Amino acid sequence: MTRARQLVLGPATVALLAVLPLVVRRDDVLNFLFLVLLSITLAQSWNIVAGYAGQVNLGHAAFFGLGALTTRTLWSAGTPVLAGMAAGAVVAALFALVIGAAAFRLRGAYFAIGTLALGEILRITVGNVLAEVSTLPATTIAGYRLANRYYLALGLAAVAVLAVAVLGSSRLGLGMQAIREDEDAAEASGVGALKLKLLALVLSTALAGLAGGLFAYYHISYYPAHPFSPHWTFDSLLITFIGGVGTVHGPVLGALFYVFLREYLAIRWVDFHLLIFGALFVAIVLLLPGGLVEAVARLRAFTRRA
Amino acid sequence: MLEVQAVEAAYGPFLALSGVTLTIHPGEIVALLGPNGAGKTTLIRCITGLLRPRAGLVRFEGEPLGDVPAHAIVERGLAVVPEGRRLFGAMTVEENLELGAFVPRARSRRAAGLERVYAIFPVLRGSRRQIASALSGGQQQMVAIGRALMANPRLLVLDEPSLGLAPLLVESIFEVLREINASGVSILLVEQNVQAALTLSRRAYILEAGRMAGEGSAAALLDDARVRRAYLGPLAP
Amino acid sequence: MRAVSDVSFAVAEGELVGVMGPNGSGKTTLFNLIAGALRPDAGAIRLRDRNLAGRAPHRVCAEGIARTFQLVRPFAGLSALDNVLVGRLYGRARGARHAAVGEAERLLALVGLEGKAHLLPAHLTLIDRKRLELARALATAPRLLLLDEFMAGLNPAETESAMALIRRIQGEGVTLLMVEHIVWALMDLSRRLIVLSAGEKIADGPPDAVAADPLVIEVYLGGTRGSARRA
Amino acid sequence: MNAFLQQLVLGLLIGGLYGLAAAGLSLVFGVLKVLNVAHGQLIMLGGYGAFWLFALWGLDPFASLALVVPGALVLGVILYGALFGWVVRAHEETRVKNSLLIGFGLALALDGAAVRLWTADERSITTGYAGAVFEFGGLAVPLVRLASLALAFALIGGLHLLLRRWRWGRAIRATAEDWEAALMTGIDVRRAYLLAFAIGTALAGAAGTLVSVGYSISPSIGLEWTLKALIVVVLAGLGSMLGTFVGGLVLGLAEALSATVFGGPYREVVGLVIFFVVLVARPQGLFAR
Amino acid sequence: MRALRIVTLAVLAGWPAWSAAQTIKVGAVVPLTGRYGGGGAQVRAGYEIGVEHVNAAGGVSVGGKTMELELTLLDDESDATKTVSRLETLAAQGVVAYLGGFGSDLHAAAASVAEKNKTPYLGVAFALHKIHTQGFHYLFSPFWKSPDIKQHTIDLLTSIPAAERPRAAAIFQEKTDWGREMAAAWTEAGKAAGYEVVVNGEYAPGAKDFSDLILKARSANADMVLGLPTPPDGMTIVKQMKELGLSPKMTLLIRAPDPPIWSKNLGKDGDYVVLAPGWHHAVKAPGVRELNLAHVKKVGRPADPIAGPAYACVQILAGAIGRAGSLDRDKIRDAIAATDMVTVIGPVKFRPDGTGIVNAVFLQWLNGKQELVWPRDSATAPLAYPAPPFAKR
């Protein structure tokens, strides 16, 4: 795809999605798209550190959760939600800086499992300390508009995609990709690996923190430990991998595909949806080992030839 | 014994071997010489089934090895001592040796094989319970050769057995190879140590940049300027 | 275990020095020490009087020492141009981005990769990958360039063109230290050779003197002592 | 003091189960370089196997190991042939990634299938001798859990011997270290992979049996056990089954210790903190060579 | 990008759109998989039998027109975010009311969506009172709450002769808000019932080892154990109590012993445990027999403890729609609030906060069966008290 087409198509998609709530007045469609957009943001943020800097972070939910926790707390106390989200992003990124220095002593699978442990530590601690359900007051619920959440999600997803697109062609992104490909060779070319890995982690977790803030704004009633659940990490990972890791489009395609399939099957086959979803997932991985981005490229090459 | 005919091999898009032909007759020691990166190890990978040639044919005792999986080639009587020894470092010396006799043709003669290896390398008997990675380089090389011998091969392929060893050790290793050959095992020896290799072998091939650059009797090659130049350059004496 | 012990030498600005020695003699270890990939247990590595021993590789690179790898290690997921850009944007040069692209393209042309800027390394031949790695190293604007077996695996024609390339780079004022197995090429290129054996320096001098050194012939051409005498 | 010692004893007992749960995962990861995140689901299936043998025929759970383990072995062969055998053909990096994805899909499918087959109810086996206790110097040592520990140890010990003495056991170890060199010594590496995966699944089946006796099983326990096993695998480091077992014991002890010191709710947190610290200080794990 | 467009179109076009039919649409999101799957299955059976019975009896008369109930039930995998998403799907289908799932976290999420969508919500199987203090307008629960349990615990204990009552209680407090709520309530109840809380130990749900709590209770000579563990935690607690020799006179566990599987799993070790599931298939109320018959036909056993209240939800809803005479959700809501009817769980009324005024029951596992032991008048067996030590069973 040419850059020019990208420049037209991206804003056009966003514009189309922006007018959608005015046309389609169904909360289920908005809610579905909200989940897709949230998944795009979360997967894209994971993509920065895993797809670009090559560090498979299995503790991603911790940053999503920290963002949600901070935002919800501040918002409940009367802070405007956007300010709360900003604070959530800062808290998530600061935590990333603190643990990153230790975690980046680990490489490869050890980094992955180490961060998984960190995520679990946070989840259990938050579950222990904050065991009370967090529910918005009835007056807030009365004024709850899903469209507001949808627009915020749309904006955030656009920011996330844009951030990854810009990063991908920037000096920093180039350095991160060099680390992903070969950390030693990157160092030999002057790339300070630790600094860039930390930067990628901070960027990634700040976005995850924002996504968490969005979740806190969206979800009326949940237990504070819920956004710390490893499921959020796994969802991000699966979406990114099945879409295409280290690409701008991968997480977008992956999120659409993953959320759609999951929701559709859950509605269509109440008793067998997990079984079908799992089996389909396995089949897709076996048939399209390169992810959806690659499959789309192959499909396009095929249709062009035909 | 072994025939390599017009073999062509590639890693991805770039060609590592082209039109390589080589023959080993029963009972021979043949040296394969050539500078680093000339494709010697690639050729060995083709012979041992780790890499499928893109074109050409490898025959062992008259049978083409085209579709034979690597592990089954050992069963046919072709064993290899890989470059860098590639021992199973966390296992004991004896476990390494016994793994050498993994294939059915060698299993029944495991005990005799062990005795033979210990007879050839008496030091190993003493260190047989030691973890292989704890051995010195020379002893590790002995284990690697011993492991290949345990397969009871009719053709032994050695990839740079002198690598990183002190000259005295190289000498004794080569002495052992001569003994092994005398017991009826053909040998294909890949070496950088030209002098030693040519002293040991009767014939030699010279591989350069993926092609056969020369072939001949060892005695002739020892005095061949081409060999010398390949290693020491035009200024070589 | 000691891979390299008590090796001392100096390289003058603009010089091209060859390092040779049999496999396992410590050449690559020496390079890793200079480039910061390994930390020396003792001794100093000075570039223009600044001690670089023990510094991280990317700092060493920023000081002006670049390297290539024995087995080529291009960034497989990045285009040729991006490979070179990494060097340009992070090395000693740290140019502005738009200027960097121009410089990267110039370097790609210099090493003979014009028209291949957008290919992935997997689609390049070995010699081209070596050229690419050289361009990436040059992009960091090195004062000293370490070439680790640059000619390994090349056919004679390719070797000739690689030699021409190295001469061109030397002509640009880069100081070169190269490990090489293809000795005739090394002897042809350099005015001075250092020979390592078992981690120690056993010879240092002009090529003809080194080639005639009996010690060098023994360890290098190898063989038993008896046959060395015969040679 | 007595209560403290009692805690440690119980921590040790559960640690043995952690070790057994991790052993299969460790073997598969070490040999195939494949991360099977559906390992917990395989444990779950093993638990159901034992449960049904008990519920339908009244078979003692420890005796039912004699059926569950071979059954799981067969299941492992099938899973390898159908799924993971395809993954091992890829390069190592893609291998881990694709195995993660396939494992995830498999886990979901098994979760869903288990609910359909056995309902979502929790199940547990209580034998006639459940709750029996050895008194030992004032410490209560529950018989069932002691037997579980002993069995776990016996299984791991057996596996250890198998990997040391059996021809194919050595082949598996050799493949784990250097599959190319293994191939060059005449080992059919694919077969070693298959065996390792099947044995790993059999170990999961055994672990599931013990879980169903000491604790309870339900279709949703998979993830929890996968995480626990994963942590033990990394804590212990790859390379030694006995090391993995000891790693499990260490984790069990650490949890018991922290429950005593920081209170029950922080049992797992402290275990994880210890894990992280060990990992950063010694990335290759406690017992890896 | 072409594929992206195709997928986008597919999402918009293929998304289930619902046609208006001549039925009353009722939606339920219930955990059928995941950690609450076991409880969800009980709830589901109650709903489905309830809807069958209402329709078999001719449906609901709405403004002179008789309409059938149409239940759409979706699985949320015990994940609150999916609960929300699937409730929205049901809303778009045009449901006039929601029936709840299982587990307080899912209920909390679901009730708030119902509130947002201004759709009446009837849920059982959660005793957490806190949700009802948020000022929710559409939330109703014909199920007893923590304060009710507290009061009835007092009633149950005071029915025991004063000299024999338990004196020292150990509370195994799950580290959740309901756990905290009930621990406070039971501590309070001790004043009236004459016991002292000697151990109040916390644990995180899903724990594999409860020995620290059990040992503390043993050394404090606790003669009563109170807790509200999930089924796996409850089973582990009982197993470990036996192993560590803690044999209180009374063990009152809410939630874990509710499913019939309890005694299958624990055998006679599960006996004597007192439970408070809110209902029993032997209570004397109209319709219980029919419910049991249908449940036997469907599942092979009389109705489970949670199936009854779930069935009652359908009865209450059908009654309210009939009285509202309209499918307007606010009118249905008001009719539910004004409920005063007799269901399979007995007479039901609602307080202004949406909690139900319902009969209370305590059951006890005796010889592998759930026996109704309180209230005395409908009891199927006398309360076995004190419970014999594990060793003597």
Image (spheres, coloured by chain):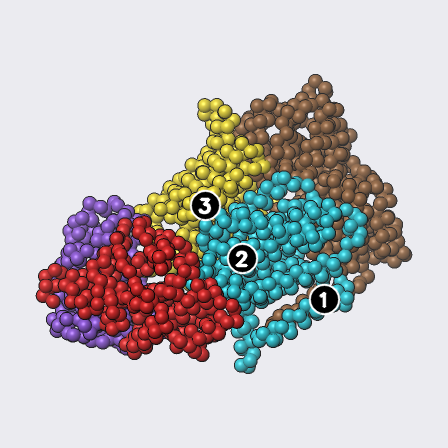
Q: Please identify, in this view, whether the residue under mark 2 or under mark 3 is nearer the observer.
A: 2
Disc 3 marks a residue whose amino acid type is: Leu
Q: Position of residue D7 (x, y in %)?
A: 50, 31
Q: Chain of mark 2?
A: A
Say if residue D207 shows up in the picture.
no
E142 lies above or below E63: above
Q: State which chain is coloured red.
A: C
Q: CA distance from mark 2 to mark 3?
A: 22 Å
Which residue reaches farthest right? E64
Q: Are marks 2 and 3 in contact (CB under 8 Å)?
A: no
Compared across the picture, whether E3 is left or right of D155 comes to right
Q: Are marks 2 and 1 in contact (CB under 8 Å)?
A: no
Disc 2 marks a residue whose amino acid type is: Ala
Residue under numbered circle 3: D279
Q: Position of residue E366 (x, y in %)?
A: 65, 32
Residue under numbered circle 2: A200
User: E206 or B73: nearer the eye?
Assistant: E206
Q: State which chain is coloured yellow.
A: D
Q: Chain of mark 1?
A: A
B231 lies above or below A123: below
User: D152 or B189: nearer the eye?
Assistant: B189
Q: State which chain is coloured brown.
A: E
Compared across the picture, whether B69 is left or right of C109 comes to left
Residue under numbered circle 1: A18
Image hue for chain B: purple
